[in-house]
Image: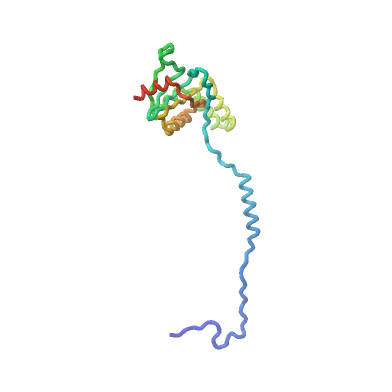
Amino acid sequence: MAEIAEGGGGGHDKGKKRAKKSSTRVDMTPMVDLAFLLLTFFVLTSTFSKPKVMSLVYPAKPDETEKVDAPKINNAITFLVTEDKVFYYEGQYYPVNAPGPEGPTKLVETNFGPSGLRKLLADKNKFVLEGKEGLDKKLKSKEIADTTYTRLLIDFKSKREALKVLIKTDDKATCKNFIDLVDELKIAEVGVIAPVDILASELELLKQNAK
């Protein structure tokens, strides 16, 4: 079988000059400078996302030498959370040994379903939810700015007519139930949420109802 030889058989290419091969070199210094310029531009002009958190009100602990009574609050609900159940009562707490106008406080059981906790909070915090609905319409029609919307919504949540919530747990309450409860409060636009210590009489009442 015939074979073609490359590169100069017979001396016919002696008079030809071959092109000299040179290595290709690219100067990357301008590219590095450009990369740093772009990086600096994006760092200075970008807005970093802020974590979304919900503020909770933690009241100061009372002096242990003083007598601790249940806080006197208006338009409020107190939730008592145990292992797998959630109870609540409205308004002031009245123990058995100091009953109120309608007798001692009675707990009502609820759940995390749409017809349970969510419906309860929607009914009790109707003042804020209706105010928010009106603000949403104004924001959508560009009658108010975002900052004004946030300020007015905070004002609604801090008014006397807005719902206030106290959360009390026993030693059997799970972190999941507590977080689920706070999530429901956030959905209902409750502005004042205060985790507080449970009273001894409340704990006893909770144990009786959780059986």
Q: Is residue 173 left or right of residue 17?
A: left
**Can residue 115 be seen in this snapshot?**
no
View extreme (top): residue: 101
Q: Position of residue 207 (x, y in %)?
A: 37, 23
Between 168 and 102, the residue placed more toward the observer is: 168
Count up the numbered dots: 0
Q: Position of residue 77 (x, y in %)?
A: 46, 22
**Can residue 61 be seen in this snapshot?**
yes
Q: Is residue 203 above or below residue 21?
A: above
Q: Which colour scheme is used?
A: rainbow
Q: In this view, does 8 lie above or below 64?
A: below
View extreme (front): residue: 65
At a point 46% along the width and 32% down the height, the residue shown is 183
Q: In this view, does 205 lie to the left or right of 135?
A: left
At a point 49% along the width and 23% down the height, the residue shown is 164
At a point 62% along the width and 51% down the height, the residue shown is 38
Quarter of the image where the N terminus is located: bottom left
Between 200 and 81, the residue placed more toward the observer is: 200
Between 19 and 38, the residue placed more toward the observer is: 38
Q: Is residue 140 left or right of residue 113?
A: right
Q: Position of residue 134 (x, y in %)?
A: 52, 26
At a point 44% along the width and 15% down the height, the residue shown is 94
Q: Where is residue 6 in the image (x, y as percent from the top left)?
A: 53, 82
Between 205 and 54, the residue placed more toward the observer is: 205
